[in-house]
């Protein structure tokens, strides 16, 4: 009897000793710095300790069945532990040893997970054997989950596909349902061609690239499913997010997108900033349409069986990168409203507006709300900035003041700038009309006269709706003309002032006639300005040649009281004509008419008046004029007139004309 009683404490001591040893083995086993030999010894010791069976206590009535279950569960746990711990001995990655080994490991881990469910279904006695088995199973599962997290990360990192925007093929959205991971190539299409095609009107899922080798997607999905089933979903998600964040950062680096603060952007000179805006536009289209779309596809494939997990992982992984790009847009939007920036700001606005449907679709869940909201806020800011910059341009044209006359009376650089600026803005007419709503001029319904100012009998009034952009363009040209008239007044020579206005208004009319500005300003505007520059051409001729041709009139040439001509006065008038002509030649060869056709037309018009008047005058008085007083023939004068408006001053005495 005494022997029996003494055996009970002995059994308890052994049991406690075994439990303590098992705890030590588990604690040491989690130490990652152990050598392979030490890990092997610990794994063997753990298996041996697990196989030791306690001396059975007298069974309570009805407890036999539970004891048998525990024995079976313990044996199962021992087997799983042996398989799992064997992989903790070596440093090699399981998936590097082949899929057979990998999937065997997954099966044993899943067996361990189910074993825990079986133990938890029992009525556990705290401190009892089943409680100890459950603790062992949980510890083992944690070890396995740590390993699977490493394997998951390893697969993502070492199977990443290189991102090369210049050389890549694209997966068609129609092939998303294929399981073979095949890629549809678009032949020689570069990424730029794909992004630009159809004015970027394609959906975000149209072009996808394989960011991770397709062969490992099923493996990643299996690991993810098992980790989530084992309540280790947070660890799995975080591993995915961390790896893919690095991939997204690399993508921005490849696309040459720098991390710039708003302060950095605001301090930048325009040439540098212009280059960075162009790079941002390209990067946004590639990043959203191709890379983000592919990133979303990847997360959806890996977490396809886990409801919204894919969307959450995608949003968390990509949020920082897309917000980095948007941050640059915000910096541009809050910068100064300088007219030279308008085209680039409109480019940014249109690109973002076009990409927002894609972004909204990819960040459709609650977790993506901040990205969707930020996109809308930046778009609104860029729109406000574009509108303010456009309106500032009008003020800049009006305030362009010159202290000195423009040399040669040619086309002023302000005229070229304004007209070319407007011509470029035509490409953004739809966007500008939308942005300028609420900023129309006083009357958006305008009467357009279908006439030229000198043919009022042909006047037919037409009421037309004038778009906001057209109203502002009409305002721009009116302000430009007023500015040019102020500049024309700076010339001391009235003729040169008219020539200057003729040149500039002709340039405006031709620019509108030969570009899409015609669709905005209309043919009526063109006719009106054709008349204006022709009017200045006639005014030039009057101001230049009327006084000179007055020397070729007969009035006052006859002696009082007789029909005889005063030869002295005739000679004096002819000499004054020559002197005046030479002065005009000397000055107006230095004047400029850049348009060759306009230059030729004015020369012909001038020649008809001057040469005809000279030839008639000399012919009429040929009997009263000595040959020695005829300095130039009509042909000489005609040749001299061909030298006018070339922008290179010369005198008739130094002329090459003979």
Image (cartoon, grey):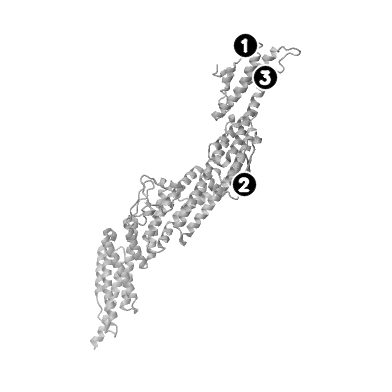
Q: Give whichever of 82, 393 is nearer the camera.
A: 393
Circle 2 — which element?
loop
Counting other residues with Cα less than 10 Å from the Cα at mark 1, is it few (<14), some (14-19), or many (20 or more)? Answer: few
Q: Is residue 319 above or below residue 452?
A: below
The numbered mark, 2 or 3, whose residue comes first in the sequence reads 2
Circle 1 — which element?
helix
Judge whether residue 655 can be spotted in this image: yes
The reply to whether discs 1 and 2 touch (Cβ–Cβ < 8 Å) is no
Counting from the top left corner in percent of width and height, residue 599 is at 56, 27
Real-space CA distance between mark 2 and mark 3, rounded to the nearest whole angstrom: 53 Å
The reply to whether discs 2 and 3 touch (Cβ–Cβ < 8 Å) is no
- Locate the C terminus by quadrant: top right
The numbered mark, 1 or 2, whose residue comes first in the sequence reads 2
Real-space CA distance between mark 1 and mark 2, rounded to the nearest whole angstrom: 68 Å
Residue 551, numbered circle: 3
Left or right for 432, reference 44: right
The numbered mark, 1 or 3, whose residue comes first in the sequence reads 3
Circle 3 — which element?
helix
Left or right for 110, reference 545: left
Counting from the top left corner in percent of width and height, residue 46 is at 26, 70
Left or right for 479, reference 125: right
Q: Give whichever of 496, 567 is nearer the camera.
A: 567
Q: Which residue is mark 2?
A: 444
- Residue 358 found in image quarter: bottom left
- Locate the N terminus by quadrant: bottom left
Residue 628, numbered circle: 1
Counting other residues with Cα less than 10 Å from the Cα at mark 2, is it few (<14), some (14-19), or many (20 or more)? Answer: some
Q: What count of labels does the image hold?
A: 3
């Amino acid at each position: 009897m005494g022997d029996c009683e003494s055996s009970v404490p002995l059994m308890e001591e052994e049991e406690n000793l075994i439990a303590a040893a098992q705890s030590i083995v588990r604690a040491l086993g989690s130490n990652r710095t152990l050598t392979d030999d030490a890990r092997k010894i610990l794994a063997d010791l753990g298996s041996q300790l697990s196989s030791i069976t306690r001396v059975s206590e007298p069974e309570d009535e009805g407890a036999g069945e539970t004891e048998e279950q525990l024995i079976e569960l313990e044996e199962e746990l021992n087997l799983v532990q042996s398989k799992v711990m064997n992989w903790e001995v070596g440093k090699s990655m399981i998936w590097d040893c082949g899929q057979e080994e990998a999937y065997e490991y997954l099966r044993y881990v899943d067996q361990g997970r189910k074993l825990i469910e079986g133990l938890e279904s029992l009525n556990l006695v705290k401190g009892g054997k089943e409680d100890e088995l459950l603790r062992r199973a949980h510890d083992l599962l944690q070890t396995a989950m740590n390993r699977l997290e490493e394997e998951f990360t390893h697969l993502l990192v070492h199977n990443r596909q290189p991102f090369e925007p210049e050389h890549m093929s694209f997966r068609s959205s129609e092939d998303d349902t294929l399981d073979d991971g095949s890629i549809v190539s678009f032949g020689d299409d570069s990424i730029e061609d794909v992004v630009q095609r159809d004015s970027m009107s394609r959906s975000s899922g149209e072009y996808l690239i394989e960011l991770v080798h397709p062969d490992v997607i099923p493996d990643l999905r299996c690991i993810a499913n098992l980790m989530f089933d084992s309540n280790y979903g947070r660890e799995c998600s975080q591993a995915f997010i961390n790896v893919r964040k690095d991939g997204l950062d690399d993508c921005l680096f490849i696309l040459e997108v720098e991390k710039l603060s708003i302060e950095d952007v605001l301090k930048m000179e325009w040439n540098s900033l212009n280059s960075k805006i162009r790079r941002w536009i390209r990067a946004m289209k590639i990043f959203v349409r191709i890379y983000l779309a592919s990133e979303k596809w990847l997360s959806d494939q890996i977490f396809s069986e886990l409801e919204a997990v894919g969307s959450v992982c995608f949003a968390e992984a990509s949020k920082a990168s897309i917000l980095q790009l948007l941050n640059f847009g915000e910096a541009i939007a809050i910068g100064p409203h300088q007219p030279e920036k308008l085209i680039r700001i409109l480019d940014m606005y249109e690109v973002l507006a076009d990409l927002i449907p894609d972004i909204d679709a990819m960040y459709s869940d609650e977790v993506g709300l901040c990205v969707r909201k930020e996109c809308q806020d930046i778009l609104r800011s860029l729109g406000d900035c574009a509108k303010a910059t456009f309106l500032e341009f009008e003020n800049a044209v009006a305030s362009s003041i010159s202290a000195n006359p423009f040399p040669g009376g040619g086309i002023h650089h302000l005229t070229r700038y304004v007209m070319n600026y407007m011509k470029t803005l035509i490409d953004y007419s739809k966007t500008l009309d939308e942005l300028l709503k609420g900023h129309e001029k006083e009357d958006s319904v305008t009467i357009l006269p279908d006439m030229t100012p000198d043919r009022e009998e042909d006047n037919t009034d037409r009421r037309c709706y004038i778009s906001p952009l057209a109203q502002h363009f009409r305002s721009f040209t009116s302000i430009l003309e007023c500015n040019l008239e102020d500049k024309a007044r700076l010339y001391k020579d009235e003729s040169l002032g008219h020539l200057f206005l003729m040149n500039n208004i002709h340039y405006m009319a031709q620019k509108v006639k030969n570009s899409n500005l015609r669709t905005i300003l209309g043919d009526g505007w063109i006719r009106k300005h054709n008349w204006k520059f022709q009017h200045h051409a006639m005014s030039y001729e009057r101001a230049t040649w009327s006084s000179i041709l007055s020397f070729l009139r007969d009035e006052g040439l006859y002696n009082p009281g007789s029909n005889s001509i005063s030869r002295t006065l005739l000679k004096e008038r002819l000499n004054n004509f020559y002197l005046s002509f030479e002065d005009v030649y000397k000055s107006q060869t230095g004047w400029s008419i850049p348009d060759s056709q306009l230059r030729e037309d004015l020369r012909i018009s001038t020649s008809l008046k001057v040469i005809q008047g000279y030839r008639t005058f000399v012919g009429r008085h040929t009997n009263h004029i000595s040959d020695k007083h005829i300095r130039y023939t009509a042909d000489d004068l005609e040749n001299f007139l061909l030298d006018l408006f070339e922008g290179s001053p010369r005198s008739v005495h130094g002329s090459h004309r003979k």
